[in-house]
Amino acid sequence: MAEPDPPADHPPADDEYAAGESAAADRRATARLVRAAQRGDTLAMNDLLDELAPFVGRICAPIALDDGPDAAQEALMIVFRGLRGLKEPAAVYGWVRTVAAREAVRVAKRAARAVPAELAELPAPGDPQLGADIRDVLTRLSPEHRAVLVLRDLEGLDERTAAERLGLRVGTVKSRLHRARDTFRKAWSA
Amino acid sequence: MTAGWPTADPDPVRRLHALAAGVRNAHVTEGVVDAPVDVVWPLIADLEGEFGRIVTDMARVRVISRDGDRLEASAHSRFGPRARFSGVLRPGWCWLQSRFLLIGVAAADHGDGRTTVAFTGGLRVPGRAALVPLGVRAEGRRNLARLAARTAARS
């Protein structure tokens, strides 16, 4: 017989239950929209676009910078072209997140406008300098590293998962991250 | 957590390209109208008046109900008898579907006192996110030309 779950030290307050239930209800509603869109209801597609467009914009802008709107449009086009093939509607956000990050990297590299300077490394999570001027930090990174940073700091993925989603070699990313801390601080304190 | 991070919310014209990508055989006709968006968009939003003179796939439009930006309407179509439409109408965005017809219009500030406008739609494969691939490009061009002419007439 399985052991019962241990009692929680601090049972969730009512509003925490409500927040959890609300998030679950949102996910179910999104999955219903995806299924309706897959069946050919273009109004459901419209509603799904309303939901996904700001999310895609938040992923694409920090990676593609000035080309963020182009990247967001192209990512959304890929999403709606591929929506019919999405097997698990509840997984739509994970799929869209990956599409958006990859597309933003592609658009940023195509534009070849942002030439990374010496700082080819990522700041540590929670580094106060990152909060001080995010855009300046972003312009010093390559598109791939901006993408890892976005997936890590905005989307809460660990670096290994972020690198895998982006098709980057995990070892390369992690070794650069290891050296990043000092480089980043030196650049800011110079 | 996201404070200070750059964001990019795609404008309505970009959104129309995205949505049309999910509709098989849809084509987006995009152009620039020589008037600001606050002059151009009221012509599209006038569903029971100017709209039918610009988007001639729909004629004698009657709005049945509105709830926020949602609406139900009926209209005659050049493809058949009066049909019931459901959709969304808000500044810069119009998306209407019936069983047999799909209409999408978007407008965004071009930044120089002009307006970028995009049209999509056509005869729908019933109940599906697909259009019959007949005249979708030509109709978009005609819609854009008619909108430009109606805007000029108002200026």
Image (cartoon, coloured by chain):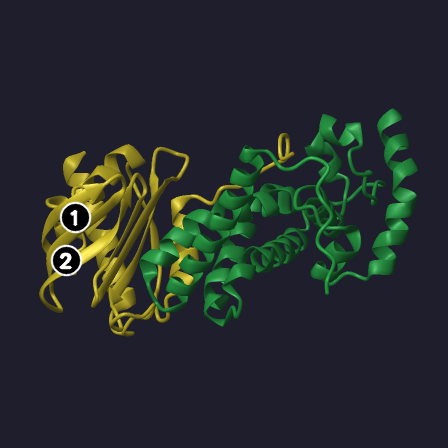
Chain colours: A green, B yellow
Chain under disc 1: B
Residue B125 bears which disc, if any?
Answer: none
Q: Upstream in the sequence, badge 2 or badge 1?
A: 1
Residue B51 bears which disc, if any?
Answer: 1
Residue at 39% of width from left, 46% of height from top? B12
Residue at 77% of width from left, 39% of height from top? A140
Image coords of residue A175 (percent x, y): 90, 52
In this view, the residue farthest toward the front is A1
In this image, B55 relative to A24: left or right? left
Residue at 29% of width from left, 65% of height from top? B137
Q: What is the three-letter code of the residue carrying label 1?
A: Phe
Image coords of residue B74 (percent x, y): 12, 55
In this image, A79 relative to B16: left or right? right
Chain under disc 2: B
Q: What is the three-letter code of the residue carrying label 2?
A: Met
Q: Count neighbours of disc 2 (C-alpha within 10 A) and say few if under 14, some if 14 to 19, many if 20 or more.
A: many
Quarter assignment of residue A164: bottom right
